[in-house]
Image: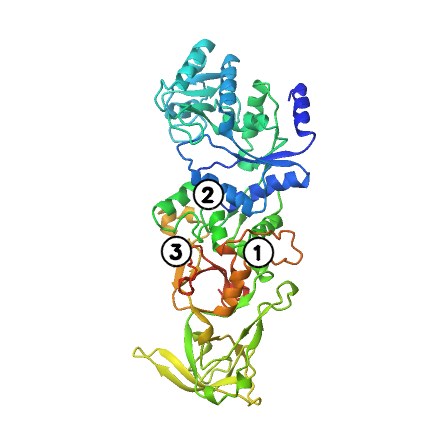
């Protein structure tokens, strides 16, 4: 580091911490990026500094506008506001000028070697392992500075085909660090850029761009994952040979989730081959998918916060992530009655019940929550629905406490029980309905348990309830000998079309969305902007759910996603 370069840097930063989150806009961000976002924005915020959102847009072949917009949306969703949004392409001319300066310093040359020839130069043996002799190519030693400069300008002017020439940095083949073996600085692409149009025929590589743009933007702490640890030497080398301010690169362990794939290339394969609904399919672990699934941003940040920041790579089982989400939701979601497989209940003596027995009862949305202490009023009716597994024809099961032909059951918040009069079957010998007696006035009949119920006048027939399971069958789908696609779980998504939900409560929760209930002892209560994914609730005994973005506004168009199971269900599984 040249001391004379520190003064202008400090004049710009005024001693503040400056970081940046620098995603490539060639795909959607995934769960691993949430740690990078939190580390960069969080470190700057902790030190009352500033953090850029900088798009590393140096590869027009892979970049699309949808990726830029998704990245901006996710950073905002996680509760962070960039100090500035910048693009590596903002600096294309400055980068080109420094590339010419690198040539004039005899630290770069135009190379015409093929990719296979470069591998050999870097010591790759015929069997594919390193260990052979490392040496520079003929272009490195036989071309003058003037010749390299002329060729590089020809590259810029489009006089070379793709792959016919690259600008390589003249580093040190005797160094044991592969990042010092004459990395490529520029390559020919001949592709228009989304921001600069057809101005450029050549584009800088990450290894050339990243450290220099960090320098241009006066980054004080260039924070990256440990996979870039070896790159620190080339990062510092390039800044020093060009005599520009050198930021301090520091590394931390990346976050991986087992049981899935996070590679953009592999996720793109899943999307393009229609194994999933898109980049935001709730079975994926892109952050767009996690958001669509209904996970609150605070749950993600709480989870990342528990992991800490170390140099060790975090390989976390998905059940641990789900546990963190479940814990967050347990303190922040109202509870509703929802039936996946309902049975119709006909109350034979409904007309005999006096009016005071039909008075609406109040059912709280959540217990012991002062921030959401509302309740909804629901009324008994002549036709009700209960969950199919809340009835059993087995009459001598001492461990079954719900409704049987000789065992009454309580309905939550109703003062009296129901008893079976008759079980009705359809042509396929499946239970179609049950006639019951409402034991009004008989307080001597004590139920062993209470079950949820939905009245006929207060139901919505749900179009789809999407139950998501793991997309892959194993903890490491990449190790499947037939490829990761062969590891796909055939029942990763189950669609239920028979479900019911109570209309009154559901309508009120929709009207209040997003609820933004403060989670006790949690610093990540992020105010969300709203959206269907913020309409969340706990379906009693079933799981946590949200409304999917494909859901319509009418009652018969509701589509729900399961966010996670209830704790007890997960334990049983």
Q: CB under 8 Å between callouts 2 and 1?
A: no
Q: Earlier in the sequence, mark 2 or mark 3?
A: 2
Residue ID for mark 1:
324
Q: CA distance from mark 2 to mark 3?
A: 23 Å
Q: Residues within 10 Å of mark 1 (few under 14, many from 20)?
A: some
Residue 502 lies, with reference to residue 482, above or below; the image says: below
Disc 2: which residue: 28
**Numbered disc 2: secondary structure:** loop
For image coordinates 51% across by 17% down, the residue present is: 102
In the current view of this chain or complex, which residue is farthest to the left? 427
Dot 3 or dot 1, earlier in sequence: 1
| Residue 371 horizontal side relative to residue 159, left or right | right
Expressed as whole percent of the image width and height from the top left, the position of residue 51 reads: 60, 36
- Is 221 positioned to the left or the right of 530 in the image? right
Tell me whether the residue at label 2 lies in contact with that at label 3, contact meaning CB atoms closer than 8 angstroms: no
Quick check: 373 above or below 403? Answer: above
CA–CA distance in space, label 2 to label 1: 23 Å
Label whose residue precedes the other's in the sequence (2 or 1)? 2
- x and y percentages locating residue 483 in the rendered image: 37, 46
- Quarter of the image where one finds residue 224: top right
C-alpha gap between disc 3 and disc 1: 24 Å
Name which residue lies at 62% across and 46% down.
308
- Position above or below: 38 against 447: above
- Which-is-in-front pick, marks 2 and 3? 2
| Image location (x, y in percent) of residue 486 | 36, 50
Q: How many C-alpha atoms fall within 10 Å of the one at disc 3: few (<14), some, or many (≥20)?
A: some
Q: Hey, which residue is sitting farthest right in the picture? A: 15
Helix, strand or loop for disc 1 = helix
- Residue tagged 3: 489
What x and y, as percent, mark residue 364? 59, 70
């Amino acid at each position: 580091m040249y001391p004379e370069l520190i003064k202008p840097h400090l004049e710009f930063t005024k001693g503040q911490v400056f970081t940046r989150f620098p995603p490539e806009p060639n795909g959607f961000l995934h769960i691993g990026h949430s740690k990078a976002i939190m580390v960069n924005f969080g470190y700057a915020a902790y030190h009352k500094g500033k953090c850029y959102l900088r798009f590393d847009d140096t590869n027009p072949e892979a970049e699309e506008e949808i990726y830029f917009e998704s990245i901006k949306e996710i950073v905002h969703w996680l509760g962070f506001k960039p100090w500035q949004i910048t693009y590596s392409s903002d600096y294309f001319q400055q980068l080109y000028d420094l590339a010419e300066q690198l040539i004039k310093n005899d630290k770069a040359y135009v190379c015409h070697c093929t990719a296979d020839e470069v591998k050999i130069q870097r010591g790759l043996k015929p069997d594919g392992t390193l260990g052979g002799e490392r040496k520079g190519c003929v272009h490195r030693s036989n071309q003058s500075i003037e010749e390299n400069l002329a060729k590089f300008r020809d590259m810029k002017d489009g006089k070379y085909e793709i792959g016919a020439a690259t600008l390589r940095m003249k580093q040190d083949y005797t160094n044991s660090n592969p990042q010092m073996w004459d990395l490529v600085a520029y390559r020919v692409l001949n592709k228009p850029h989304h921001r600069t149009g057809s101005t450029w025929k050549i584009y800088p590589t990450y290894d050339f761009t990243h450290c220099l743009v960090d320098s241009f933007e006066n980054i004080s702490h260039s924070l990256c994952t440990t996979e870039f640890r070896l790159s620190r030497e080339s990062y510092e080398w390039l800044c020093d040979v060009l005599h520009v301010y050198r930021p301090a690169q520091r590394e931390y362990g990346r976050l991986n989730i087992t049981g899935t794939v996070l590679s953009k290339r592999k996720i793109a394969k899943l999307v393009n081959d229609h194994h999933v609904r898109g980049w935001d399919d709730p079975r994926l672990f892109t952050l767009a998918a996690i958001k669509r699934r209904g996970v609150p941003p605070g749950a993600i940040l709480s989870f990342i916060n528990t992991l800490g920041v170390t140099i060790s790579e975090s390989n976390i089982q998905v059940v641990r992530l789900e546990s963190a989400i479940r814990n967050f939701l347990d303190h922040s979601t109202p509870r509703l009655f929802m039936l996946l497989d309902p049975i119709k209940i006909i109350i034979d003596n409904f007309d005999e019940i006096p009016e005071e027995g039909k008075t609406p009862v109040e059912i709280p949305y959540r217990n012991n929550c002062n921030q959401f202490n509302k309740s909804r009023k629901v009324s008994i009716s002549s036709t009700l629905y209960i969950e199919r597994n809340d009835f059993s024809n087995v009459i001598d099961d001492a461990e079954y406490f719900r409704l049987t032909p000789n065992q009454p059951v309580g309905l939550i918040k109703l003062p009296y029980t129901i008893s079976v009069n008759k079980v009705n079957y359809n042509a396929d010998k499946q239970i179609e309905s049950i006639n019951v007696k409402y034991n009004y006035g008989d307080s001597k009949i004590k139920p062993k348990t209470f079950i949820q119920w939905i009245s006929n006048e207060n139901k919505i027939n749900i179009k789809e309830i999407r139950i998501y399971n793991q997309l892959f069958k194993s903890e490491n789908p990449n190790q499947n000998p037939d490829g990761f696609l062969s590891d796909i779980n055939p029942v990763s998504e189950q669609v239920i079309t028979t479900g019911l939900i109570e209309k009154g409560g559901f309508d009120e929760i929709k009207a209040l969305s997003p609820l933004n209930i403060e989670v006790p002892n949690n610093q990540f209560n992020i105010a969300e902007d709203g959206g269907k994914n913020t309409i969340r609730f706990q379906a009693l005994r079933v799981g946590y759910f949200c409304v999917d973005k494909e859901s319509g506004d009418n009652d018969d168009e509701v589509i729900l996603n399961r966010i996670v199971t209830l704790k007890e269900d997960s334990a049983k599984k």
